[in-house]
Amino acid sequence: MNENSEKIKIEQIRIERLTDKHNLKDFNSYELDLVEFLLEDALDNQSKKMSVTYVWLLKETDAIVGYITLLNDKINLEGNLKDIFRNKGILYKSLPAIKIGRLAVDDRFLRKGIGTLMIAFATNIAEKIFNTYAGCRFITLDAKRNKDRSKDVIHFYKKLGFQILKERSKGSTPMYLDLS
Ligand SMILES: CC(C)(COP(=O)(O)OP(=O)(O)OC[C@H]1O[C@@H](n2cnc3c(N)ncnc32)[C@H](O)[C@@H]1OP(=O)(O)O)[C@@H](O)C(=O)NCCC(=O)NCCS
């Protein structure tokens, strides 16, 4: 699905902070643990001030087309990255970030541009934090790896400018986007 006409526009979306009023039961993703998180943990984590989850609804039908969970984070500067920032005059051991803890688009709405809009949403929030309240240099996340290339989201993140923070042979790959 590459044609713009088939992409969903932000004007078609309503973004709401997750509450117990949302009907989550129809949300579906091939990444089952991301469905489980939304159904079982997202609200609980939010009530404990661990993270905030935003559900994305299609205005036309009220269907939940995706969700994104955010929390605060930091990047520890090690190895190469430490040198890169030293060269920029930044001598701290760690730098402030906002983390995308979870991100999922419903299977029925994949490749319609919603994931890209969600990254833009996270970027806007990070910019807003910086412009109004506190330092925030990066967006971080742990990219879920999948042996099936069509499901390996590292390509999605790289396309949006994320870089690999640490290579790992299995599990998830920590990535970051520098907002400077
Ligand atoms: C990752 C995810 C959020 C992307 O959402 P999406 O709405 O389908 O992404 P977009 O439509 O904005 O994709 C933009 C571009 O990224 C690339 N892309 C998207 N998903 C990709 C994938 N799985 N593999 C390779 N490239 C991908 C494509 O180039 C795509 O553009 P195109 O469709 O015009 O070719 C979605 O695949 C998803 O929810 N996956 C399951 C859950 C998951 O793994 N979440 C990430 C946890 S770290």
Image (cartoon, helix red, strand yellow):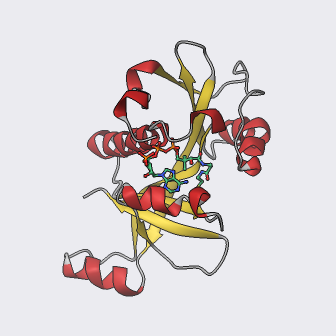
- Left or right of 22 in this view: 60: left
Front residue of 85 and 1: 1
**x, y percentage for residue 3?**
37, 36
**x, y percentage for residue 165?**
45, 73
Q: Which residue appears farthest toward the left when viewing the image?
A: 88
- Left or right of 176 in this view: 67: right
**x, y percentage for residue 42?**
70, 40
Front residue of 10 and 124: 10
Q: How many marks?
A: 0
* Residue at the image point whose x is 74% and y is 38% from the top: 44
- Residue 60 position by quadrant: top right
- Residue 135 sits above or below residue 17 on the image: below
**x, y percentage for residue 36?**
78, 43
- Left or right of 13 in this view: 107: right
- Residue 140 sits above or below residue 35 on the image: below
* Residue at the image point whose x is 75% and y is 50% from the top: 33
* Residue at the image point whose x is 59% and y is 79% from the top: 168
